[in-house]
Image (cartoon, rainbow, N blue to C red):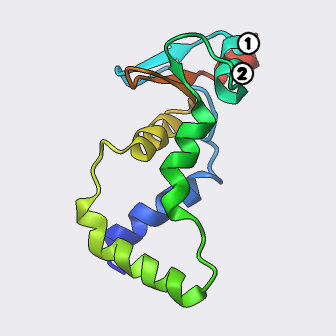
Amino acid sequence: MKSENKRFITEPMNFLFSDNLLSGGVKAPSDIILLEDKDKFLRLSLSQDLPDGYLVWQDLIENSVGEFSLKNNYSEAEDYLEDIDEEYSDLQEESILEKIFEIYKEGLYPCGMTKDEKIVTFNPMILKTG
């Protein structure tokens, strides 16, 4: 596996063990909605009963990661990783998973999406200061 491709695959895994995960942040990408309301953040993250204009977050995530489900056979999983290597150049920065990862890297928690595809995030720093 090429080092650039290996970094692309391992960076999210390494990030899970970093101090930046859910650290809270002051810098938010301009194309997201930043929440400071804990109750609304919990509702958007966990509920199926949402205000008008929002998509069910768990459904969106499940649909996005469905293609990455573990394979029953190790050799199939190995073949899959080789396919990722070949298709790496086809991945676009605009994928929803890439956007979500960028938000996590800012210390924020993505928790919802509007029907016009704006990601809604919560700043965990609110919990530390409030």
> Is 12 above or below relative to 128?
below
What residue sits 44% from the left and 77% below the top? 81
Q: Secondary structure at mark 1?
A: helix
Which quadrant, please, contains the N terminus? bottom left
**Residue carrying label 2:** 42
What residue sits 36% from the left and 77% below the top? 83
Q: Amino acid at mark 2?
A: Leu
Numbered mark located on residue 75 in the image: none
> Which residue is at the far bottom?
75
Marks 2 and 1 close (CB-CB < 8 Å):
yes
Gap in angstroms between the C-alphas marked 2 and 1 = 5 Å
Residue 64 image position (x, y, % from top left) = 49, 48
Q: Amino acid at mark 1?
A: Asp
Disc 1: CA contacts within 10 A as few (<14), some (14-19) or many (>=20): few
**Residue carrying label 1:** 39
Residue 65 image position (x, y, % from top left) = 52, 53
What residue sits 72% from the left and 21% below the top? 42
Residue 30 image position (x, y, % from top left) = 35, 20
